[in-house]
Amino acid sequence: MNSRLFDSKLPLSGISVFARMTELANRYSAVNLAQGFPDFSPPVQLFDYLNEGVQKGFNQYAPMPGLLQLREEISNRLKNTYQHDSDPETEITVTAGATQAIYTIVSSIIRHGDKAILFEPAYDSYAPSIIANGGIPVYLRLNEPSFDIPWDELEATLAKEKIKLIIINNPHNPCGTILSKDNVNRLYTMAEQYNCILIWDEVYDLLVYDNNTHHSGLEHELMLKRGIVVYSMGKTLHNTGWKIGYVIANSYITSEIRKLHQFTVFSVNTPAQYASAMFLKNHFDFFKKLSEFYQTKRDFFVKNLTKCGLEILPASGSYFILARYNFDKSISDESFAQRLAQYCQVACIPISAFYHDRYDSRIVRFCFAKKEETLQIACERLNNSIDKIQISK
Ligand SMILES: Cc1ncc(COP(=O)(O)O)c(C=O)c1O
């Protein structure tokens, strides 16, 4: 008997498009440019530090907010990168990746009926975090084709509805866009005027290209009043599977986040925290070279997609790039992505997956965090076989 003893908290959530596209990639032996993870190894020193941590006895529960030496190194890195002073004792919390950080932050703030603004296309964990906590997502679509913030609509929404929280992703997944300093200031000004909290999801903060600068939510004077900033080690150390993230917030917000953190994960993998701390301490230069490292990949991918007829949209940050197909508007982006996997053996993500109403502007997302040879194969397949998609109609 399959009786339902309770109603689903997330009735509209099913298997994610990332899992579906990965399944298709496997079925058709496609190159997987769908899911956002590197197909190359993390720096080897990280493995040595992991081993060292295990040998040195870092094998039991870490302190609930994170190993102090990791929080100290995070504090140093934020000081170094953003001239931001954060107290490792009271303002930094290590989490099991950014996803857990976001869920825990949202849980600590959102109560039944509270509203939170999301800009779409939006990373897929934001809305479920709000809904599972009884909140109401208020969706605003980023302007196309620039994917910048719809300022008038934002102002009108804030004036009309009581908004508790705004979630901002910068650099942006899936769009690859970045915010200007003026944008960051404007968001804080609005948050101050309408008394909102800002969550800054900055997991791609070190992946910014063409001599652009990442303007962090940490850099504003109102940060310690109403900003919460989230990072992920996985995106910078090429080790998404280690699931180490961290949150910066004032001491009150931090203590509220920690109250929930201690009863959900309690603490995060100790040897992995040790290794991350040692790497941050001894290899800071590695992070300075990341932008160049990824920009080379982005440029390689774009340069080699010579004949596929896709319109590649500009990407200034993150390790994603969007491509619009203009040759057949009758194919939905989801169907296009399925055919790309089947006929070209390249997997991507349709960006309708990042809209709650599956808004479809005939755009797909590729992840270029891949070895050059992987990107080369993907480009050859796209260049040589994309016309099969039309024939397959
Ligand atoms: C915008 C954004 N936020 C958060 C995350 C989650 O990061 P983590 O793997 O550390 O949970 C991702 C991962 O893809 C992401 O793209």
Image: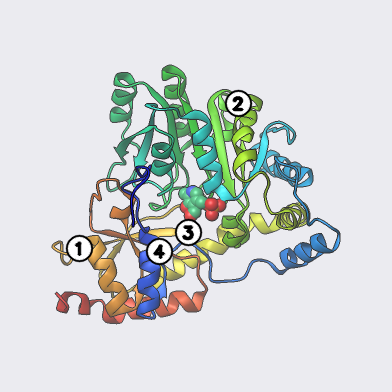
Indicate the secondary structure of the residue bearing disc 4.
helix
State the residue position of label 4. Answer: 19
Disc 2 beta carbon < 8 A from ligand 1? no
- Mark-to-mark CA distance, 4 and 1: 26 Å
Q: Earlier in the sequence, mark 3 or mark 1?
A: 3
Closer to the observer: label 2 or label 1?
A: 2
In which image quadrant can residue 7 be found? top left
Residue holding disc 2: 224
Q: Are marks 2 and 1 in contact (CB under 8 Å)?
A: no
Residue depth check, mark 2 versus mark 3: number of the one nearer the observer: 2
Which quadrant holds residue 377?
A: bottom left
Q: Residue at point 58% right, 33% down?
A: 219
Q: Nearer the viewer, mark 4 or mark 2?
A: 4
Disc 3 CB within 8 Å of nearest ligand 1 atom: no
Amino acid type, callout 2: Leu
Q: Residue at x 26, y 62 (%)?
A: 334
Q: Amino acid at mark 1?
A: Asn
What secondary structure is marked by label 2?
Answer: helix
Q: Position of residue 278 (x, y in %)?
A: 77, 55
- Check the picture and name the quadrant holding the C terminus: bottom left
Q: From the top left corner, tell me how far across and down residue 204 is, in percent.
A: 53, 51
Dot 1 beta carbon under 8 Å from ligand 1 = no
The residue that disc 1 covers is 326
User: What is the C-alpha distance between the residues marked 4 and 3?
Assistant: 19 Å
- Looking at the rendered structure, the kind of residue marked 3 is Tyr
Q: Earlier in the sequence, mark 4 or mark 3?
A: 4
**x 57%, y 23%: residue:** 225
Which secondary structure, mark 3?
A: loop
Q: Given the current orientation, which residue lies at the most extreme front position?
A: 1
List the residue tagged with mark 3.
Answer: 319
Q: Is residue 99 left or right of residue 280?
A: left
Residue in front for this viewpoint, 196 or 265: 265
